[in-house]
Image: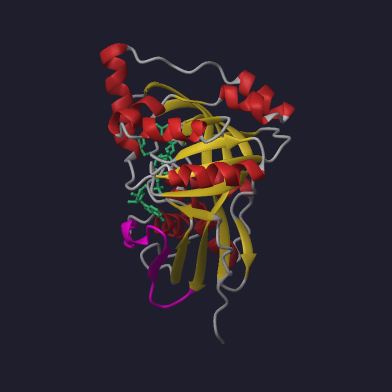
Amino acid sequence: MVPTPITVRVPAKVNLHLSVGDARPDGYHELVTVFQALSLTDDVTVVAADDPALEVKGEGADEVPTGPENLAWKAVRLLAEHCGRDPENPGVRISINKGIPVAGGMAGGSADAAAALQAVNQLWRLELGRDELSELAGKIGSDVPFSLQGGTALGTGRGERLVPVLARHTYHWVIALDREGLSTPGVYGELDRLRADNGNGRIGEVEPLLEALASGDPRQLALLLGNDLQSAAVSLRPGLRRTLRAGVQAGALAGIVSGSGPTCAFLCTDSDEAVRVAAELSGAGVCRTVRVAHGPVPGAKVVSDEPAHRPTPPQVHA
Ligand SMILES: C[C@@](CO)(OP(=O)(O)O)[C@H](O)COP(=O)(O)OP(=O)(O)OC[C@H]1O[C@@H](n2ccc(N)nc2=O)[C@H](O)[C@@H]1O
Ligand SMILES: Nc1ncnc2c1ncn2[C@@H]1O[C@H](COP(=O)(O)OP(=O)(O)O)[C@@H](O)[C@H]1O
């Protein structure tokens, strides 16, 4: 009998609020963050196979490791250990179709780990619940629990402790992809350096942003977007200043570096406006590619027992 593949679709994220505390003794920073899952997605397909293998397709696939350091493999090995299987020979083949920019601050690797957990949970009929999967997810990376959960959520600790947040509205975003990624530890390190040098400013409390989300008014939300890592990302990639300015000049309500960057996310009033801003931004020559996206969307979700047909994301080449 031909084994049945299982495909999980998983979203990218943007941090609407990312407040970074001091470095902890374990090297991580204490965060208060609000994640929102966006409609840029990866598809991860797993199938039982005697010879384990991992292939990566889609945009940026060349930059993604296919060996044990791929976060999807880490997820499968961890799940195998957890349920008493041989982690070195899990009997799974993985195929990843990337729609999330690689090393872009949108949690693409974390998304694939979350999708692999969900897919293999079903493949092996483990029936692990959300809480158990989320605990395993946190061991793989700080963003992985959110990739499982999706929606809009408040994250604390390393970002792995989550509480869902009420978001009344669908928000429309323009996403500007840069030509090359930035390393997450490198950006956190640059923030520590900037703070040691000049006490770099910190964004405010999260409560007003939570209230804006509850009100559903994108104009109110736009005033409150904030990211402590933005100055560090801009310090490492000064061209981002121009990208951020160009998005607002094109008509976005506000622009922000997504997580550790270098992707920039621009909040727009509605979907028509997002398409218009995307077209104008792509003509400004300040980034590699522009996409439109909306959020919140659900977290990692089985889309079929057959390899899914990916919807082509709307995109405009700069
Ligand atoms: C910055 C954020 C914002 O959501 O996302 P990205 O922009 O990378 O997508 C996250 O904090 C990234 O989370 P994630 O990519 O899962 O990081 P991890 O694998 O857990 O950690 C990678 C490295 O980032 C740094 N790190 C991560 C999380 C945290 N709270 N403090 C840190 O200092 C540490 O140097 C750590 O060794
Ligand atoms: N499945 C994966 N997809 C993308 N990158 C991965 C994956 N597994 C490991 N990586 C590594 O993680 C790094 C960070 O990628 P990514 O998670 O896309 O960005 P970010 O941490 O900025 O959100 C990449 O440079 C790559 O080396």
**Is the residue 187 above or below the residue 90 in the image?**
above
Extent of the magenta region? 48-67
Q: Is residue 4 magenta?
A: no
The spot of residue 32 in percent (x, y) is: 51, 25
Q: Residue 167 location, x and y as percent?
A: 69, 34
Residue 74, placed above or below residue 180:
below
Q: Decide if residue 166 is in sight here.
A: yes
- The verdict on residue 50 being magenta is yes
Quadrant of the image where one finds ligand 1: top left
Q: Quadrant of the N terminus?
A: bottom right
Q: Residue 113 versus residue 210: which sits nearer the camera?
A: 210
Q: Is residue 144 left or right of residue 190?
A: right
Closer-to-camera residue (30/314): 314
Q: Position of residue 162 (x, y in %)?
A: 58, 35
Residue pictured at 29% horizontal, 20% vertical: 194
Residue at far bottom of view: 1
Q: Position of residue 166 (x, y in %)?
A: 71, 33
Which residue shows up at 27% across the image and 22% down it? 193
